[in-house]
Amino acid sequence: MARIVILGSAAAVSDATHDNTHFILIGERDTPILVDCGSNPAGKIKNLGIDDDALQDVILTHFHPDHISGVPNMLMHMWLLGRQTPLRFYGLHHCVNRMEDMMTAHSWEEWPGFFPVTFHRIRERNDTPVLENADFRITAWPVKHFVPTIGLRIENKVTGNVLAYTCDTEPTDSLDELCRNADFLLHEAAGRGVGHCSARQAGETATRVNAKCLYLIHYWVWNTDPTPLVDEARETYDGPVTLCKDFDEFEF
């Protein structure tokens, strides 16, 4: 069965045991897909038994450092290990344009023998196709954050199960459509405020969209115990609630 592996669970302020939020999708029939890259995930992916060349698709949800700043290190890492397999990035114009500028600032066009990298721009509209392979069909919805940002709806083509990922967002109408009837709702819990949601609000969304289970991610960890977030979410949601931790694995 397909699985999601949490490579980082923290919001923008990480600590020694919680990396910034990013995860990898591993299917049964095709290559894995990385979602965001706040730090270089190559070592973690290697520990999962996944070869560098096996990773061929990366989705970037928005251009904030805790979601994209690991890309240059990851690309340099792969290049120095001799990678020649192409790598594809997907994101909104706002994010992709800035990613290309950032790589130009690193003079990547001068890295000899560098492998092919392509950037694919997706539209900032509801239910926009992102990518499809033998395992997953992935679409995006714009959510409400400080900069243009997408949440993801990921369909397991083998089981029909749906994983909805809110990314960084405050409550907004598109979020309900994105998460409707999700088998697995991965919801941020950085705290109530502009551009973010609290665990209580995550529970409200899970109840409203009829999600089968709720997984909290992208939460505050610095000098803070995040475990009470589970009880906070349970105040507004009666289903199973899990606090994601780095290196957790879930089947869906």
Image (cartoon, grey):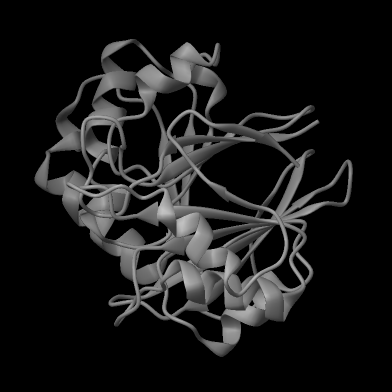
Q: Is residue 92 left or right of residue 31?
A: left
Q: Residue at x 19, y 26 (%)?
A: 111
94 left or right of 164 in image: left
Q: Nearer the viewer, residue 27 or 161?
A: 161
Q: In this picture, is 138 found above or below 31?
A: below
Q: Position of residue 50 (x, y in %)?
A: 55, 16
Q: Residue shown at 19%/35% (left/top)? A: 108
Residue lying at 88% horizontally and 41% vertically, measured from the top left: 158
The quadrant of the picture occupied by the C terminus is: top right
The quadrant holding residue 81 is top left
- Where does residue 144 sit, x and y in percent of width and height? 41, 81
Q: Quadrant of residue 205?
A: bottom right
> Would residue 127 be visible to someone looking at this image?
no
The N terminus - image quarter? top right
Q: Position of residue 28 (x, y in %)?
A: 78, 27
Work out whether residue 42 can be spotted.
Answer: yes
Residue 164 point in image, percent of width and height: 65, 60
Labels in figure, total:
0
Residue placed farthest to the bottom in the image?
173
Quadrant of res 49: top right
Seen from the viewer's position, the closer of residues 67 and 191 is 191
Q: Is residue 7 above or below residue 191?
A: above
Q: Nearer the viewer, residue 176 or 141?
A: 176
